[in-house]
Image (cartoon, coloured by chain):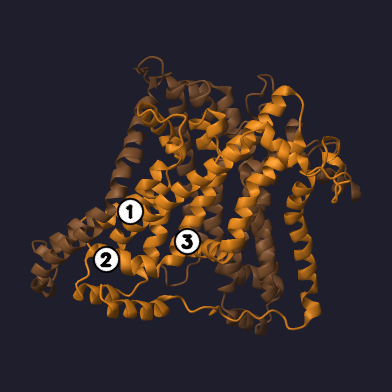
Chain colours: A brown, B orange
Amino acid sequence: MAATVESVERTAVGGSGGSARRGRDKRSPLARGEGRAAWMFISPWVIGFLVFTAGPMIASLVLSFTDYEMIRAPHGVGLENYQTLVQDPKIAKSLMNTFIYALIFVPTGTVVALALAMMLHKVGRAAGFFRTAFYLPVMTPAVAASAMFLLLLNGQRGLINQVLGWVGIQGPNWTADPAWLKPSIAIVSLWSVGGSVVIYLAALKNVPQQLYEAAAIDGAGPVTRFTRITLPMISGALFFTIITHTIGALQMFDQAYTMFYGPQQKATASDESLVYMIYLFQNAFQFFKMGYASAMAWLLFLIILAITLIQLRIGKRYVYYEGERD
Amino acid sequence: MSDSTLVRTQAVEQAVEPPAAATPPDRPDARWWKRLPFYLGLTVATFAFCYPLVWLVSASLKPKSQVFDNRLIPEVFQPQNYVEVWKTAPVLNWLFNSLTVGIMAAGTVTLSSAAVAFGFAYFRFRFRGPLFGLVLATMMLPGAVTMIPVYLIWNKLGFIDTQVPLWAQNLFGSAFYIFLLRQFFLGIPRELFEAARVDGCGYLGLFRRIALPLCRPALVIVFIFEFQASWSDLMKPLIYLQTPEFFTMPRGLKQLVDAFALSGEYHWEIAMAASVIATVPMIILFALGQRHILDGVATTAQKG
């Protein structure tokens, strides 16, 4: 089968070989043949885009203006879903929870990963071993990690509070005290911050050594070298991870759902761990409010878009890229 | 393709491969005592990152009453927990399902993304720029926006409670991998393709015999990344699977924990054993593909 296609192509190309040198005329058989082959190669994406991205986007937008619970055909309700969105206290609560989680996780994750990467950079060849150690948690499936941390973070008997007790700290009731649910989830995410460590380490290795030597000659101390050389030189990598982590944090689901949600969830339970994606998931696939959930999805999209655009704008000012960027 | 082309391909392969270990010599301080604090800090950090996994294995071998005792070596060894898991839940099914879904998801996404990436890297055609921009733009779209209509599509097609929706979308490539592989394909010297063309190689031949073999490391990265993503995914199995026998490992693990919660009797030792079972294949994958994975993560950020 593949061989046939190839031989067909070969003859087509053979027939037009002469015109190949005559530049890229749109009319030339070669260009036409090439165009056809190109579309053949990208056709999977084009089909997938139409069926699984563009189509569903439109459908989702339309659904967001309807009342659809899968029993009867959707019927239009105008802006009602969006009005409910504004009034629903759980939307405000879940958005707040998500923001708080992101504000805990993204900065601490960045700082911890950067500190680890800088230490790795200092030890030279031994870095390989430690790098592997930091990456193991990334390989652990989120559900397994969350189940494990549910026990490690146990208020009375968990290992973490036991260790805190050794240094005289009375640990909180992580997984039961409503005030500590979001930090608990952040700890689980923080545990698998190894990916950023790997990225930062690679970026640190690319900082030209001469810069430090020149700075040292000029009498720059370690703090100055860090803020004036290291940070600007790895700002591209920092920026990349901050943006992807923020987008990921705003859509966080696995950890919070595994730890605090499920069929056993009581209606009276605390909403402190209700992140936006969980509430969206519940509306769509537990209450089957497809229209309302679609409106929720678009609100999330707009929020993520706005935050990312703001970050990009800030990034433009502070991020330094070496010339080779295209 | 003639043998001579093959030889040439191999010769160039060595040229294309990034020179190994050409990292600029980073000079850690030569005096070892100056590095000591960093070693100490890293050792503490390594302990913090790795001990939970050790604790997990240990807890999975303890009797119910001792799961929380935080001993490194269980006072009473109870490896039967692993037999008990098998009896409590269809764990073997879950493992097998995760494996097949993972291979399907990773295999299809690697091939389709590579084909699309090659289309964007090699050919010059109308609307290439805008189309590629569109590919990149879809990366920004949160999955939540398309999640519901896509569910309705699979529902209409009668694929609910089957594993097809967990991987079939990968047949159409994935924006991020297309972007990544295109970067690698662009790194292949164009003369190589021209030479093959002169030798009478068709476009499919260029893709199969030059582009794919030369970018094997990148393909491995994509395969591993997607396999890991598929293996760890919770959301899609939650949406699409209802029959416990069809569950994937994370979905099954969640089910197990929920069942204990519902019955009010927590068998954490069983849940921990299941967590170990869910994690071990990923650790094996990491052991096998460590270099690819770590280098892949580092390159990803640089190309991004």
Q: Are marks 1 and 3 on the same chain?
A: yes
**Which residue type does callout 3 highlight?**
Val
**Which residue type does callout 2 highlight?**
Gly
Q: Counting residues from the N terminus, which is met first, the one under dot 1 or under dot 3?
A: 1
Q: Secondary structure at mark 1?
A: helix
How many circles with numbers are drawn on the protein? 3
Which mark identifies residue B220? 3
**Vertical side of A122 occupied by A179: above or below:** above
Residue occupied by mark 1: B133
**Which residue type does callout 1 highlight?**
Gly
Of marks 1 and 3, the one in the foreground:
3
Q: Are marks 2 and 1 on the same chain?
A: yes
CA distance separating discs 2 and 3:
20 Å
**Vertical side of A79 occupied by B46: above or below:** below
User: Which quadrant of the view contains residue B215?
Assistant: bottom left
Q: Secondary structure at mark 2?
A: helix
Residue at image location 61% in from the left, 51% down from the top: B281
CA distance separating discs 1 and 3:
25 Å
Residue A264, position as x, y percentages in the image? 67, 24
Residue occupied by mark 2: B205
Counting other residues with Cα less than 10 Å from the Cα at mark 2, is it few (<14), some (14-19), or many (20 or more)?
many
